[in-house]
Amino acid sequence: MNIAETLLNLWNTSGFAKIFAEFLTGGWQNLVMILIGCVLLYLAIVKKFEPLLLCGIAFGCILTNLPGAGLYNQELWTNFMTEGHEAYHSYGTILKEGGLLDFFYIGVKTSIYPCLIFMGVGAMTDFGPLLSNPKSLLLGAAAQLGVFAAFLGAVALGFTGPQAASIGIIGGADGPTAIFLTSQLAPELLGAIAVAAYSYMALIPMIQPPFMKLLTTPEMRKVKMEQTRTVSKAEKIVFPIVVTIFVALLLPDTAPLIGCLMLGNLFKETGVTDRLSDTAQNALMNIVTVLLSTSVGATMVGSNFLTGQTLKIVVLGVAAFILSTCGGLVAGVVMYKLTKGKVNPLIGSAGVSAVPMAARVANKEGQKANPSNYLLMHAMGPNVAGVIGSAIAAGFLLSVFGG
Amino acid sequence: MDIFTNFNPAGFVECLPRMGIGMLVIFVVIGLIILTTMLINWFFSK
């Protein structure tokens, strides 16, 4: 074999040759997706849009669109989901024929990653504000309005029920919940939904304030809320146990998410499992974030992502966020009226989950209206209630469409 | 482009009850959590 032949063989097996040879039949899509991956990296690194997640998602997107690398094989997962195919639900086939990102993706498919992330979130969450003011849970429930409104919008735009449910959950403003539900109901939309969910979560400081001003009066925004009572350690220990039992018995489909959230919280509150709490909050959370983000990015295959559907998801996602914010704010206004001005309705906007960003935005807007106003702890109640609320919404949608 | 096709207003109307049921389920479950929390508060204040 001469040098020219060797070089020719090398060129023919390269990804460049594949891109040029298949340019019109899909190669251009790979190039566009690599470009999108670079834009997402820019947003993560320079603009600091959810960098911990978006960095991995963007890099996963680039890796999966490198022809010939074989890191992620869309057709394996299509066969995995095709009833009657010999590889139907066969993880053995994935392990035998898949690439590195296929192996990572098993954790998404089996819902292990979102649940472990929830465990970490639980270990970082203080339910104290919610326990001292249980009524704030209602704001977390009202802020799920966008989930169902976007679900309806998606159905009207021609999505199937399971796809519409997955799009609607973007309104829960909870990345792991969106990934958990989408990987089970509409895995073909996972990349678009995850990117939309995390991008909008990063944009909360820009999306929410106009609607906060629109739905509340300056008088309402000035309200200073009373100091919440101190919650005992025993209450904080009993709460995750009791809630897990109640919610999992009522809606068994929520058990993985709520169970992990509350287990993480129990680790934090017991006082005898500090090492486990520390691991759940830091090491485990970081490792799972790496695996989750890169494998979600890997699903952004050009042929799947560059469709009109993605554009619809982007529009429906922002509508879901806005409507969820409005749902929480309207419930806040109702509480303001019922309590004769004791509740600042701005804390309702924190019911969209997105911990702690949404609570910080409520606090900031409150301080703009009244510089001596400190709403952060009051907003943390609806904020963590939003996490529970979106998990319940996901469980409901899973029980309806999960078959 | 499929953005303007597949428009399904009938599906929207059909799924409206599901939206109502979904929100109701969330409020019922959250309501039960509130009751449970109040019970915990009451029990530990004793």
Image (tube, coloured by chain):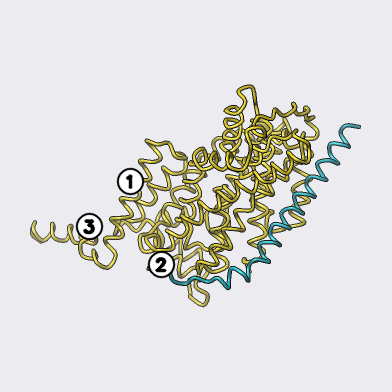
Question: In the image, is residue A168 above or below residue B46?
Answer: below
Label 1: few (<14), some or many (≥20) within 10 Å? some
Query: What color was chain A assigned in the picture?
Result: yellow
Residue behind mark 2: A75
User: Which subunit holds the residue at mark 2?
Assistant: A
For the point 57% across and 44% down, which residue is it? A117
Residue behind mark 3: A14
Q: Dot 2: what SS? A: helix
Question: In the image, is residue A399 above or below residue A297?
Answer: below
Quarter in which the C terminus of chain A is drawn: bottom right
Q: Which of A334 and A249 is in front in this view?
A: A334
Where on the picture, by quarter, is residue A30? bottom left
Same subunit: marks 3 and 2: yes
Q: Nearer the viewer, residue A381 or A1?
A: A381
Residue A315, percent from left and from top: 47, 55
User: Which subunit holds the residue at mark 3?
Assistant: A
Residue A353 tag number: none
Q: Mark 1 against mark 3, which lies toward the viewer? A: 1
